[in-house]
Image (spheres, rainbow, N blue to C red):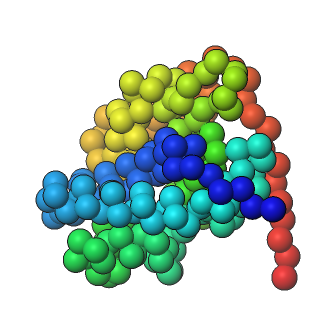
């Protein structure tokens, strides 16, 4: 049985994912503020509609593949639909976004990977209701969420050298950087192998 989830239960996660993608357009594209706002709002609406029957806060991994935003040799159709609303073509999107991007939008966590062999990095993380914790960005503070998403985009786009140099010089992955700022133990991730 599918539970119809209210937009409010998905809003932080969808907002984090849309904000991440929107920053690529802002940094790498010739997209004005109004276009960026339209793209963001359109993509939020599309994702909320798409996920409403596939959002399971009691079992966050259920439906994860369905909610995955994937850009590789094919553009994710939902991202493409929002971009077309502001006049961007799929070809322009391939220039503006990483050529290999996987973005997982799950209850309580939004993660991404750039490249097939890239590290999985957490953009947004929160605790289920009743645990007393609220949503946080990579730095462990909701106030740092925009800064950390910007740093993630800067690293992915070859942006400000300081963002990349600090990680390269210290030889730590983005996941390790996240763990350094975390006050709670890390989660165990289960791996599923699919063979054809």
Q: Position of residue 191 (x, y in %)?
A: 81, 54
- Is 156 situated left or right of 102 in this image? left
Q: Quadrant of the C terminus?
A: bottom right
Seen at 27% across and 42% down, the residue is 160
**Relative to 146, is 112 on the left or the right?**
right
The residue nearer to you, when weighing 107 against 146, is: 107
Of the pair 76 and 85, the residue shown nearer to us: 85
Quarter of image, res 152: top left
Q: Position of residue 113 (x, y in %)?
A: 56, 55
* Count of numbered tags: 0
Residue 18 lies, in percent from the top left, at: 41, 54
Q: Can residue 63 be seen?
A: yes
- Going 42% across and 57% down the picture, which residue do you hit? 44
Most foreground residue, 47 or 70: 47
Q: Is residue 118 visible?
A: no
Q: Is residue 185 above or below residue 57?
A: above
Q: Which residue is depicted at the point 56% across and 25% down?
A: 134
Rendered position, 184 above or below 110: above
């Amino acid at each position: 049985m599918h539970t119809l989830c209210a937009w409010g239960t998905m809003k932080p996660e969808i907002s984090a994912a849309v904000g991440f993608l929107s920053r690529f357009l802002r940094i790498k594209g010739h997209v004005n503020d109004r276009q960026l706002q339209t793209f963001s709002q359109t993509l939020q609406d599309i994702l909320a509609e798409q996920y409403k029957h596939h959002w399971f806060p009691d079992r966050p991994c259920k439906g994860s593949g369905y909610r995955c935003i994937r850009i590789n040799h094919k553009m994710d159709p939902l991202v493409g639909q929002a971009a077309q609303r502001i006049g961007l073509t799929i070809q322009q999107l391939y220039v503006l976004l990483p050529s290999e991007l996987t973005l997982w939008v799950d209850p309580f966590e939004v993660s991404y990977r750039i490249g097939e062999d890239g590290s999985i990095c957490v953009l947004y993380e929160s605790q289920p209701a009743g645990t007393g914790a609220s949503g946080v960005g990579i730095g462990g503070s909701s106030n740092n969420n925009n800064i950390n998403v910007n740093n993630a985009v800067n690293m992915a786009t070859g942006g400000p050298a300081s963002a990349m140099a600090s990680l390269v010089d210290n030889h730590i992955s983005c996941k390790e950087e996240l763990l350094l700022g975390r006050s709670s133990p890390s989660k165990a991730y289960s791996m599923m192998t699919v063979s054809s």
